[in-house]
Image (cartoon, rainbow, N blue to C red):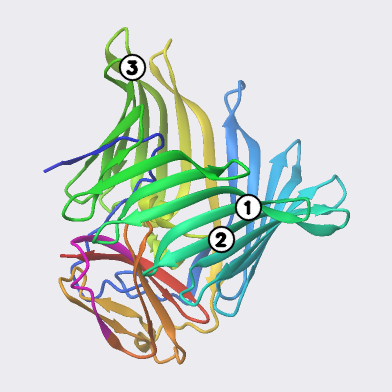
Amino acid sequence: MKTKILFIAIFLFATVTYSQYNKKDSDFLNQNKSILVNKQKLDSTINYQWNNNIQWVNLNKTEYLYDINENLILEINLSWNNNWQNNTKMSYEYDNDNKLINKIIYLWNNTSWINDIKISYFYNSLNDFQTILTYSWHNNTWQDSLKEEYTYLNNLLSEKILYSYQYNNWEFLSKYEYSYDNNNNLSLETYYYWDNTNWVNSTKKEYAYDVNNNLILKKIIYFFWERIFDNYNNLITDITYNWITTWEYLWKNVYTYDTNGDQMQQIEYTWDTQASTWTPKQKRDRLFDNNYTFNDLVLPFTSLADVSIFTHKIDNEIAYSWNDNSNNWINSYKTEYFYSQYTSDDINENQSNIILVYPNPTSDFIYIDLPDLIDSDVLFEIYDMMGHKVMSSTINSDTSLDISHLATGIYVYNLKTINARYNNKIVKN
């Protein structure tokens, strides 16, 4: 049975793909207990463009470098001009808990890298953002530019204030206020701007949820979205409507998944008002390697958006444009993903080194079995599919956690140790 969810909003949400787990072996790393000695590390991606000579030509490239804890520490972007040429570079620095504390962006000036922007991250005791500072490089020094301050109430983000550095002072720029329902779902987001004297209301966004905490309504003005899910909670269609004098079709995306839950195809359509029909515009086809699951990979900054697209190793993606004259798809862009073998010194194949989180699905308790090699505190966090943290606990041995208070639905949980980070999905019945 398909489920329809309506949105009224001015922007789209990240697609979220879900999978079902139903046995103890659905552990944090993958269903086959494969804490691998040799994982697959994403080293680079290359984007190609289809040219008039009917061939793929290099367009741009991104290279990645990681530390021993699988944290991304260097990202280099290159563009093609008869050879690969440097464009931008980003370096990342982490604290002892693997939290990102500094990001620096560099620009290439034909001979060397020069500083451009630096972003520093500061956290509270619950590892949530407390302050984010942005600096710009000027006169050979980092100078204050922007500041973000975060305030929490009952472990939920209640306010975010943005400042701009002007005339040696931090000046108000804008502010966001957040309210939540009884299930800790975001229900109201209010945006203000500073008029040099007072906070002035600018935009208000309202959210509504069903009994399973699924977002069913996002309301601002002018647009609304209808989303349709399959029986596995995979998003298969989203339709955007535009308000003229009534709600009218604007565009539509249709998603197709393989048997492993990987999003193998996405087709975008626009509404032809004269012909009263959907016209295809763009298509993306993805190819996966099912020998490696999402948690067998070392990737730069995994997120809910990543999990939504694939649960296995992605090898390539081809984008097509629709040709109205020939009524067929023509090549547009292609992305290839290049991996290499990654070996972690502190992980081996012994079964005692498996991290287990079970049962999955569950209706009340989950049990976490930690391997013997973990001899320090472990941070265990649960997030809903909107990215809101709904539970956080520090554990240091095999333990059980009561999640009976959580609403029925699908969640993402993170496990953080000194040397590693893992994430996966859990189903609450």
Q: Which of marks 1 and 3 is in front?
A: 1
Q: What stretch is highlighted in magenta?
A: 400-412
Among the two numbered marks 2 and 3 on one chain, the one whose residue lies closer to the N terminus: 2
The circle drawn on residue 415 is none
Question: Mark 2 near mark 3, Cβ–Cβ under 8 Å?
Answer: no
Residue holding disc 3: 244
Q: Which corner quadrant of the image does residue 59 belong to?
A: top right
- Which residue is found at the position 30% from the left and 79% from the top? 356
Residue holding disc 2: 149
Question: Residue 152, relative to residue 367: is it above or below?
Answer: above
Quarter placement of the N terminus: top left
Q: In this view, does 272 lie to the left or right of 213?
A: right
- Which residue is found at the position 78% from the left and 55% from the top? 168
Quarter placement of the C terminus: bottom left
Is residue 150 within the magenta segment? no
Which residue is the extreme one toward the left?
A: 1
Question: Mark 2 near mark 1, Cβ–Cβ under 8 Å?
Answer: yes
Q: Is residue 34 left or right of residue 62?
A: left
- Which residue is found at the position 29% from the left and 87% from the top? 399
Q: Distance between the residues labelled 1 and 3?
A: 37 Å
